[in-house]
Image (cartoon, rainbow, N blue to C red):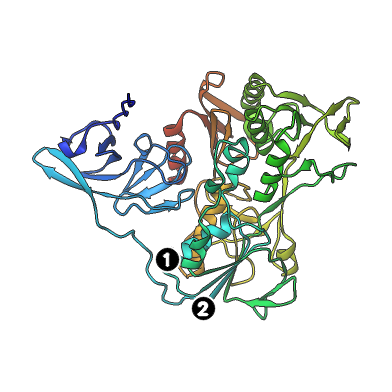
Amino acid sequence: MAEAQTPPPGPDLTQGVAADFPGDTLLGHVGDQEVVLARTGATIHAIDAHCSHYHGPLAEGLVVGETIRCPWHHACFDLRSGEATRAPALNALSVWQVDHERDRIFVRRKREQPVARGKPPVDAPGRIVIVGGGAAGFAAAEMLRRQEFRGDIVMLSDDAAAPVDRPNLSKDYLAGSAPEDWVPLRADDFYTDANIQLRLGTSVASIDTKARNVVLARGDSVAYDRLLLATGAEPVRLSIPGADQPHVHMLRSLADCRAIIRNAKGARRAIVMGASFIGLEVAAALRVRGIEVHVVAPEQRPMERILGSEIGDFVRKLHEEHGVIFHLGDTVAAIEGHNATLKSGGSLEADLVVVGVGVRPRLALAEQAGLKLDRGVVVDAYLETSVPGIYAAGDIARWPDPHSGENIRVEHWVVAERQGQTAAQNMLGQRQAFDAVPFFWSQHYDVPINYVGHAEKWDEIAIDGDVAARDCLLRYKAKGRVLAVASIYRDVASLQAELAMEQNAPV
């Protein structure tokens, strides 16, 4: 006997619903397709119900003006056009025709409306060169075409793979719960169809700012009218004996992740060096694969520097409940074969070692070009560097953050994507200040941690809810002012905190 199919959630919108439905959103369906109604003032919109990033439920998100924000990773969509207006979502959603009949709302068909696009630039450069194939570089190239830029786009990446969804490399893909075809940000034919010259395996040796040329390592050069530096960061490499062995890995690229997965097959025990975000996400992924995991790190609590002691203790307990063994306040002094000697004097046998002890911004090109540096590439509010026509985005950029009132540099995926998008608009002369509130998320087993804002230091953490119960919101304050908010299963509150920071309102 065939199993009965689960009916789609919510009311059948083809049969109509009351126009005065409670709240700002209502989840329903048209046939087997889920659709969310969203109210903005007196207008009701209908849009696909799931975010195009990781399928987040938009009905549980936040309506802001004529947009709706995803509760999971804070992507944003225009309710009128379906356009993905904020990373991490890149693909538009379908919008649906809303019919008003007396006091009821009916949705029966998709609207035949093209995605809203930018106006063709009046004074566009002939060629834009992007150095880097990560989040910022890809987002910039994609936005340039979305903005109807018709000039040349040359993307120079020293990676062997086309731009990938890097957060997946330490999460679902590494755990074996996501197929590899989820990893590329776009299929290979996207670059051909969009006329983006993606040159992989291409290293840049220098930048001639007077001649406006990018000089490649092999000797030839590429001229530019506008240049975006999006060189990202690279993992901190260990100088201990044995760090160059084949079973000792970094994790930054798709090739790195593939190598770890190959080494994980048949592995019984792994050592993860580092107890911050990447290290612990790797630990969780390897535990999903059934591998015994030992985490060695010098700090006394995981993630304490960024999230404080309460979240640090919670994260440690969560991982211990899943079998992770911690060796905190310690480091690996040497690796001889499969034996790792600890600074404390102990030792561990391991078939696999993953090093996640931090990253450094790749600043060599910027320094050679004479750009102003300050623990990163200094940019203005429009992400332009000290040399006109050269922009920087992503892990290398230090920008004036209007929310903290300081110049900051942030190594987060969503920030890099949003900066790439803004830099693209500004290279076309649009003069859009980058004022997005920094956001990141981290996933540990089934527990997501969301973070908005930026707090390098704080003098108080105000906790609403219960951290141990996985239902909490933490406000990081300095002199009474909220600089950042972390949350576990408080998705709408996280979105509201982000909005308050954007509006310079109390959080």
Q: Earlier in the sequence, mark 1 or mark 2?
A: 2
Q: How far across and how far down the image is residue 51, in percent?
A: 41, 43
Image quarter for residue 145? bottom left
Q: CA distance from mark 1 to mark 2?
A: 14 Å
Q: Which mark is residue 147?
A: 1
Quarter occupied by the N terminus: top left
Question: Given contact means CB atoms under 8 Å apart, are the residues at marks 1 and 2 in contact?
Answer: no
Q: How far across and how far down the image is residue 250, in percent?
A: 74, 44
Q: How far across and how far down the image is residue 403, in percent?
A: 52, 46
Left or right relative to 338: residue 449:
left
Q: Amino acid at mark 2?
A: Gly
Q: Residue at x 45, y 33 (%)?
A: 491
Q: Amino acid at mark 1?
A: Gln
Q: Residue at x 50, y 59 (%)?
A: 422
- Find disc 2 in the rendering and name its residue: 126
Residue 400, placed above or below residue 176: below
Image quarter for residue 14? top left
Q: Is residue 482 visible?
A: no
Q: SS at mark 2?
A: loop
Q: Nearer the viewer, residue 371 or 98?
A: 98
Q: Residue at x 11, y 37 (%)?
A: 103
